[in-house]
Image: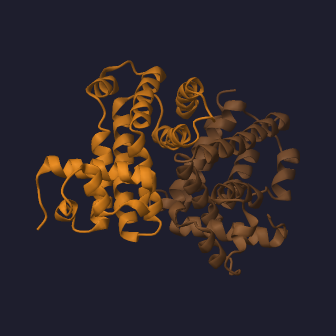
Chain colours: A orange, B brown
Amino acid sequence: MVRTNPERRQALLDGAIEVLARDGARGLTFRAVDKEAAVPPGTASNYFANRDDLLVQVGHRYYERLQPSDAAMSMLTEGPRTAETITALMTDIVDRITNFRTGYLAQLELRLEATRRPELQSLLTERVQADLTLNIRNHLDSALPGDEDTVLLLYLSLNWLILERLTLPGIFTEEQAKALVATAVDRAIGKG
Amino acid sequence: MVRTNPERRQALLDGAIEVLARDGARGLTFRAVDKEAAVPPGTASNYFANRDDLLVQVGHRYYERLQPSDAAMSMLTEGPRTAETITALMTDIVDRITNFRTGYLAQLELRLEATRRPELQSLLTERVQADLTLNIRNHLDSALPGDEDTVLLLYLSLNWLILERLTLPGIFTEEQAKALVATAVDRAIGKG
């Protein structure tokens, strides 16, 4: 029987994120998750059908915890229709992801694990694709400068910028990273 | 005593790359490398001072195996000074890295492992920084269109494009990925 106390389920998923970031995919066991979430042994196995189910739920939880702020959503719909508004939005999302360090590292571990698990790969693909499609639609609906390629290029470049900041922080200073977001936006918009 | 037969050393590093890609950083032991390289037990421990030394040498070996072709180098110095030449060069490097799938996945495992090992992190940072500096100098010396930011933006966006192709290949088709390289180049060059 799969248990459904939503708060405990979230605590288990948040624990799994910490385990993944710290110990890698190989360290992720139900026992490690129980320990990390400080719940009785056997709890995680009551909440997830198997390890793959847990991995996929972690992927969803990552996106859940990265929901844009109300401020960002209203900037998207009501801010001036300029490159500066896009830069402010992108800076907001880059900062939110960078500050959720363990979540991002866990997500990378999931991607690497997906190269070994077709089922996980197909579920993560759906999740990322849905997110990308939503971002493109939001951008086009917003009448902000740029097009579909603008969104795709920002998705690519800012994801790696975050990866760089979190895995090799000596490559770009915080100031350089900040400037790169603005440059990435300006150039991704194109010549119009 | 650290052994120095260069061919055997390379075979061990290539074995370590396969182990990292397949089993993750946690699976990388001297014993696993010996087995993968099909050499007698105890060989790897004669070639590397410790596991960190092995990890760093794997990082160098990755770059060694990705040396640009003579064709790419002569295109860089002698091709027409246009965006198309940059696109051809970038397509060449993206293809080479994508085809060296295990090398790229091993490199990602090293980055994740670096978040847990300051010494490895500092050595990888040096390596990546040197590579980036060289790419910028080559680009500026080449008088191809674009500037330092062009190189940085291509570094960011194409690295993630490769990661996407290798971890979630369903997100972009091969054709879309190819078109994205050209678009990334055009936009990274900027308005001039």
- Name the residue located 63 percent from the left edge and 48 percent from the top edge: B120
Q: Is residue A9 above or below residue A159?
A: below
Residue nearest the observer in this picture, A69 or A20: A20
Residue A3 on image: x %, y %: 12, 60
Residue nearest the observer in this picture, A70 or A99: A99
**Residue closest to the far front:** B1
Residue B41 on image: x %, y %: 67, 79
Q: Is B40 on the left-hand or right-hand side of A125?
A: right
- Name the residue located 28 percent from the left edge and 62 percent from the top edge: A31
- Name the residue located 75 percent from the left edge and 34 percent from the top edge: B145
Residue nearest the observer in this picture, A99 or B183: A99
- Name the residue located 43 percent from the left edge and 50 percent from the top edge: A22
Q: Is residue B2 above or below residue B35?
A: above
Quarter of the figure with the C terminus of chain B: top right
Q: Is A15 on the left-hand or right-hand side of B122?
A: left
Decide if residue A180 is in sight here: yes
Q: Is B88 on the left-hand or right-hand side of A42?
A: right
Residue A64 on image: x %, y %: 27, 44
Residue B80 on image: x %, y %: 83, 44
**Residue closest to the far top:** A80
Q: Is B143 on the left-hand or right-hand side of A83?
A: right
Decide if residue B189 is in sight here: no
Quarter of the figure with the N terminus of chain B: bottom right
Residue nearest the observer in this picture, B119 or B24: B119
What is the number of callouts on the image?
Answer: 0
